[in-house]
Image: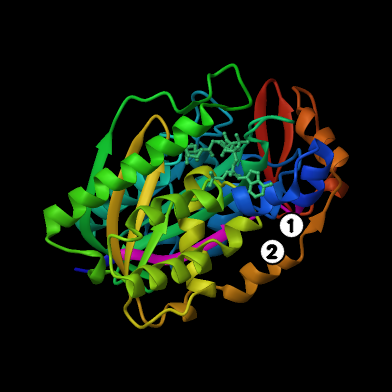
Amino acid sequence: MDIGIDRLGFYVPQKYIDLVELANERDVDPNKFTIGIGQSKQAVPDLYQDAVTMALESADQVVNEDNREDIGLVIVGTESSVDESKASATYLVDLLDLPEDVRAFEIKEACYGATAGLQMAYNFVAMNPDKKALVVASDIARYGINTPGEVTQGAGSVAMLISKDPHILKLDNKSVYMTRNVGDFWRPVFSKTAFARGKYSNEVYVDFFKTLWEKFQTKYDMTVQDFDTMLFHIPYTKMGLKALRTLDGNIPDAKYKELEEHYQSSIEISRNVGNLYTGSLYLGLISYLINGDVKPNEHLMLFSYGSGAVGEIYSAEIKSDYKKYLDIEYIKKELNDRKKISISDYEDIFEKEVENGDVTAISDVHDKFYLSEIKENERLYKKLE
Ligand code: HMG
């Protein structure tokens, strides 16, 4: 039985900052941000938005009358959780009118969470072929104003509907994974911003890729020639390139050139959005599906990495008529209709916090789902009708 991604949704906040303007404000050569890091724009979530509202937005794009009643599992992968106890997925069941007979929960392991969810969803559908699973990656990457990580912030969510006979991506059920207890990046419960040993995190990421890629080739007796495209977790667009470059000189030049060209198509959206944390790999997939010169039934390698650290490489096949099932025009419009804000407006939003007793004014809301108020320390969400 074929199992994989049947539908994909993507949400990006409406506001963004220009990273040349950020560089000028921080007294940094803009080329460092646009070439050295490889980022052009960065999404800025509004105060009424969080991991829950963004998850609702992308999930709303994939749930419809034809599949709603079949969904039996809802997983939100996030490291931007709004509650230490209650899972974001419970709000999705409510506001998307999903049936009550679902398992709904949240998964955390930095940027690896959505991949963990996807693999669980695969097993769930294998055991329950008539059911579907909703896996949503939703995060806000925050390092802090004027920190080295600031240029690698971002926000957004990706939703994936997993089913048998998928229309977008068939998972091959071939994967290798590994875990090591490393201190490359972390966010203690008291902190709204992450701590990172930046250069060390880059080294661990590349080392995980090299180790897993060796493991994958040995386990399945496959080589780079078995793949048309390699997709990477993209905390910033230079990062995946650093991993890809470890193949340069070790594989035929023509193959490396092909992979690098495909990589460029996979980072076009991330370059203009920033780090989605656990959604980043899947935003790379969406970007490649929209911008790449995709051949029928292409074979992909996907490298998932979550600091801390867990990594996984797995393979998949793009379904030849995927374009009928991915709303490319919607995603393009979403990206194009965004509004640039000034660096000082971004700093104001960044430093403000919604507090107990606050109520969101409807006139401030530009999205379908929003945090309506915090009452008795409980976050309440609504859908704009
Ligand atoms: P930094 O110290 O500000 O930058 O931190 P740098 O000095 O390393 O420079 C960056 C690049 O710009 C270098 O290129 C420079 O040469 C170049 P590289 O050697 O890397 O190829 N450069 C220039 N290029 C053109 N013109 C110029 C110029 N000047 C310099 N004038 C760092 C950069 C990414 C470390 C920092 O932003 C950071 O700490 N970010 C957060 C951590 C991170 O994203 N790590 C990635 C791996 S870990 C991961 O992916 C997991 C994660 O997503 C979290 C999770 O799992 O949840 C982060």
Q: Residues within 10 Å of mark 2 (few under 14, many from 20)?
A: some
Residue 127 horizontal/vertical position (percent):
20, 54
Task: Mark 1 and mark 2 in contact? Answer it, CB < 8 Å.
Answer: no
The residue shown at (65%, 39%) is 50
The quarter of the picture where residue 77 lies is top left
- Whether residue 354 sits left or right of residue 216 in the image: it is right
- Whether residue 105 sits left or right of residue 238 in the image: it is left
- Residue situated furthest front in the rendering: 249
Question: Does the numbered disc 2 mark a residue whose Cβ is under 8 Å from ligand 1?
Answer: no
**Residue 8 among those drawn in magenta:** yes
Position of the C terminus by quadrant: bottom right
Position of the N terminus by quadrant: bottom left
**Residue 68 among those drawn in magenta:** no
Residue bearing the label numbered 1: 385
Res. 346 in view: yes
Total numbered labels placed on residues in the image: 2
Residue 300 horizontal/vertical position (percent):
33, 66
From the viewer's perspective, is residue 100 above or below residue 256? above
Which three-letter amino acid code belongs to the residue tagged 2? Leu
Which three-letter amino acid code belongs to the residue tagged 1? Glu
Q: CA distance from mark 1 to mark 2?
A: 23 Å
From the viewer's perspective, is residue 39 above or below residue 28? below
Span colored in magenta: 4-16
Closest to the observer: 375 or 197? 197
Secondary structure under tag 2 reads: helix
Q: Which label belongs to residue 323?
A: none
Residue bearing the label numbered 2: 335
The residue shown at (45%, 50%) is 242
Name the chief secondary structure element in magenta. Answer: strand
The image quadrant where one finds ligand 1 is: top right
Res. 166 in view: no
